[in-house]
Amino acid sequence: MISSVLVANRAEIACRVFRTCRSLGIDTVAVYADPDADALHVREADAAVRLPGAAPSDTYLRGDLVVAAALAAGADAVHPGYGFLSENADFARAVLDAGLTWIGPPPDAIAAMASKTRAKELMAAAGVPLLDPVDPAKATDADLPLLLKAAAGGGGRGMRVVRDLAALPGELAVAAAEARSAFGDGEVFAEPYVERGRHVEVQVLADAHGTVWTLGTRDCSLQRRHQKVVEEAPAPGLGPALLETLRASAVAAAKAVGYTGAGTVEFLVTGDRAYFLEMNTRLQVEHPVTEAVFGLDLVAHQLRIAEGAALPPEPPAPEGHAVEVRLYAEDPARDWAPQTGVLHALDVPRGDGLRVDTGYAAGDTVGVHYDAMLAKVIAHAPTRDEAVRRLAHALARTRVHGPVTNRDLLLASLRHPDFAAGRPDTGFYDRNLPALTAPAPGEDLAAVAAALAAASGRTGRFGAFRNVPSQPQTARYGDHEVRYRPTRDGGFTVESHPHACVVAVSPARVRLDVDGVVRSFEVATHGDGVAHVDGHRLAAHPRFTDPAARTAPGSLLAPMPGTVVRVADLAVGARVEAGQPLLWLEAMKMEHRVTAPASGTLTALHAAPGHQVEVGTLLAVVQDAPEKETDL
């Protein structure tokens, strides 16, 4: 029997595993890098062991340090979570060699599925349907579009869509470099890219006694940068024959590698055909939707299987529908740029068919080193329509104060006609992102409330007579300009929004009568120039331009905090074209290309691989200068 579990991970998944351990009477051990010294998963664990350093390569990816931590803390088992070392066969072997229980599949099964090219060979032998591979050296226009994928990768790293044959060599080089940086293996392969396919997966659970469960399907088609954003179970709109193909293929995949524990077999679905993509030899981020539908605790089953228990012959029957969204600290309107900063508030509704899994609490800081996911919000209901409605209602009432998040995008996604009708596909955000990132309904009135709340805070007492300016005052929040005029009785009139009549004002709450309907707005500020009004995040524009913010024309500033991982092979004085990649930043497990803002001459380059940069750091300068310098 397992008595103490070390989770070789951090944040949300560590907290998730700890929750089940506590319910089973099992002690918990956390590991933490220096930026996570006061993280929620550390605070919730019974014991914690420091991994000195900040970068994942020095901390959470150091299997030797994690095993040593387990032994030092007296743990007798290790749960890998997901990401980091969770699909590392050598780490699994090291855990077993140290005399600890490994809560995961056999190392040989992990190794067999670690390479996507090797996994496809095994699946072909097992009769699992596959897409025909494409040799990049022999590709023609008829093969386009192509999807380049890292053989050893996941999470969208080392993946590129190629639509122009002339771009193939360059994209191959970039994909290989990214794969080598992320996984230590630069092997890349190509396969047909299905424009409007669906990402459908099957949850498997297998014991060491020959029983393999398949726990329905999940649809994870709504993705950004090949990373999942919205997931649901069961996958909508699949016919009986296709469902049987998915189930049988998932069982064949698991048996082909002698799988035990929890795992996921992923498929590309187009029309009534399914093609094997990969097998994730670990727990998935989206596992809660399966738990909700089947009434199971998959982590508890992982622990029992690791202890040698047998599964019943058949799983429980599914019930209802579940939908999950991933709440990220990121800005979808700015190329999904990750965001950092203090979480002044994190309040997500729970209960009544709602579940929240998170690794953060109010007051915590979102840093640059790790994944940008703040929380997963899951809704379960008897029908899909009810689950979607319940989840949208919860998101609309979610309060996240601090960094920019994708909350509004998630809400708009759930309410989009294609998603509401059960027609998800992997091109959803490519087609709809501009509309989904447009200002949320009601944002103009939220800006009015922010301006009035700020003005009331400056005037102090309310309701008393005071001299007021004869001209209206102006405030700007985001894209909204608010013109208001203080009145002699301490109130305000809103000249920019004549349909809004002010009922009551304080620094924390504003009530407006809008065409006969009284609406109340809660306003919060935290000294960072941002107003949070109900679910809206509104940045205030300064009344005067900060001279320090001015930069020379052509200056290329870091769009986010991160680490420079690669720099283009260019020398100062080289001619560059608009959009040409100059360097690559890694932030929160994602790589971001920083490109030339315009065609011109590279007159300065201040970045080098390994440099840590903050938002606004000057990286390079591209000026519209002559291609060749003239002699003085």
Image (cartoon, grey):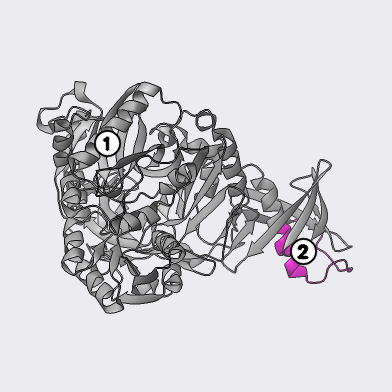
Could you tell whether 18 is left or right of 526 in the image?
Answer: left
Q: Is residue 227 above or below residue 302?
A: above
- Which residue is label 1 attached to? 251
Report crowding for label 2: few under 14, some 14 to 19, many 20 or more residues within 10 A (C-alpha): some
| Quadrant of the rendering where the N terminus is positioned | bottom left
Q: Is residue 62 above or below residue 249?
A: below
Q: Nearer the viewer, residue 260 or 128?
A: 260
Q: Is residue 466 magenta?
A: yes
- Image quarter for residue 197? top left
Q: Position of residue 534 (x, y in %)?
A: 65, 54
Q: Position of residue 340 (x, y in %)?
A: 44, 62
Q: Farthest left residue?
A: 137
Q: CA distance from mark 1 to mark 2?
A: 61 Å
Q: Which residues are magenta?
A: 451-472
Of callouts 1 and 2, the N-terminal one: 1
Q: Closer to us: mark 1 or mark 2? A: 1
Q: Nearer the viewer, residue 294 or 531?
A: 294
Q: Amino acid at mark 2?
A: Ser
Q: Amino acid at mark 1?
A: Val
Q: Is residue 555 magenta?
A: no
| Quadrant of the rendering where the C terminus is positioned | bottom left
Q: Is residue 474 visible?
A: no
Q: Residue at x 43, y 37 (%)?
A: 429
- Which residue is label 2 attached to? 506
Q: Secondary structure at mark 1?
A: helix
- Image quarter for residue 350? bottom right
Q: Farthest bottom residue?
A: 72
Q: Is residue 564 above or below residue 40?
A: above
Q: Residue at x 16, y 61 (%)?
A: 93
